[in-house]
Amino acid sequence: MKSITLILALVSLLLVTGCNRGPSPNAIGSKLTLAMHPNCSHGNGPTGIGRVTYAPVPQSGHTECRTAGDKSITCNEAFNPDTTVTLMAIPDPVLGPDGKPLTLIEKIDGCNATACQGCPPGAWTCQVKMDGDKLVEAYFCGRVH
């Protein structure tokens, strides 16, 4: 009888412990919505082309979001809670006849963006702490050449 009681106690302990393990490492955390606009915020000017990279890599495994033609695009990615995500906005590297880039980053809303030293030409970076759902918007402007 003691062995049956001991076995039942162990099974009960395993069931209770198994239910209280905390969040799974693959659980969806905070959502980062990245809206990329291929036009200046004021709506004037030619279309700009670019991409934004994520570090660390989000749960989906995607490493970047790219503009698509002349339409805005939105990328949604999940990160583990309290992760600090570094975004790097990189304009298309194509140069005009004057040797200057044809696409510039006009602005990035939703994080404190700064020009990136030692990065691709014209790139900007910013960091976002994923302590909740976040929205970041990047505006890529085409330059008249």
Image: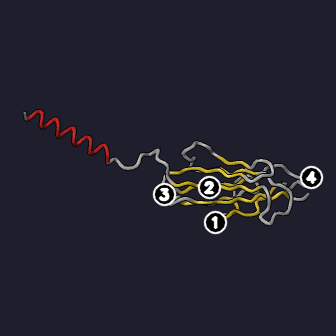
- Measured in 3D between alpha carbons, the distance from the residue under mark 4 to the one under mark 1, in whole angstroms, is 32 Å
- Measured in 3D between alpha carbons, the distance from the residue under mark 1 to the one under mark 2, in whole angstroms, is 16 Å
Mark 2, residue position:
33
Q: Is residue 94 above or below residue 45?
A: above
| Helix, strand or loop at mark 4 | loop
Say which label, 3 or 2, has the lower sequence index: 2
Q: Are marks 2 and 4 in contact (CB under 8 Å)?
A: no
> Of the numbered discs in the image, which one, if any, rests on residue 112?
1
Say which label, 4 or 3, has the lower sequence index: 3
Q: Residue type at mark 2? A: Thr
Horizontal side of 95 relative to 55 (left or right) equals right
Q: Residue at x 91, y 57 (%)?
A: 145
Q: Mark 2, residues whose alpha carbon is within 10 Å: few (<14), some, or many (≥20)?
A: some
| Helix, strand or loop at mark 3 | loop
Horizontal side of 39 relative to 15 (left or right) equals right
Q: Residue type at mark 3? A: Asp
Q: Position of residue 64 (x, y in %)?
A: 66, 47
Residue situated in front as seen by the camera: 132 or 105: 132
- Measured in 3D between alpha carbons, the distance from the residue under mark 1 to the one under mark 3, in whole angstroms, is 18 Å
Total count of labels: 4
Q: Residue at x 65, y 50 (%)?
A: 75
> Of the numbered discs in the image, which one, if any, rests on residue 82?
3
- Measured in 3D between alpha carbons, the distance from the residue under mark 3 to the one under mark 2, in whole angstroms, is 16 Å
Say which label, 1 or 2, has the lower sequence index: 2
Which residue is farthest left?
A: 1
Mark 4, residue position:
97
Say which label, 4 or 1, has the lower sequence index: 4
- Measured in 3D between alpha carbons, the distance from the residue under mark 2 to the one under mark 4, in whole angstroms, is 35 Å
Query: Which is closer to the viewer, label 4 or label 3?
Result: 3
Q: Residue type at mark 1? A: Asn
- In the picture, the quarter occupied by the N terminus is top left
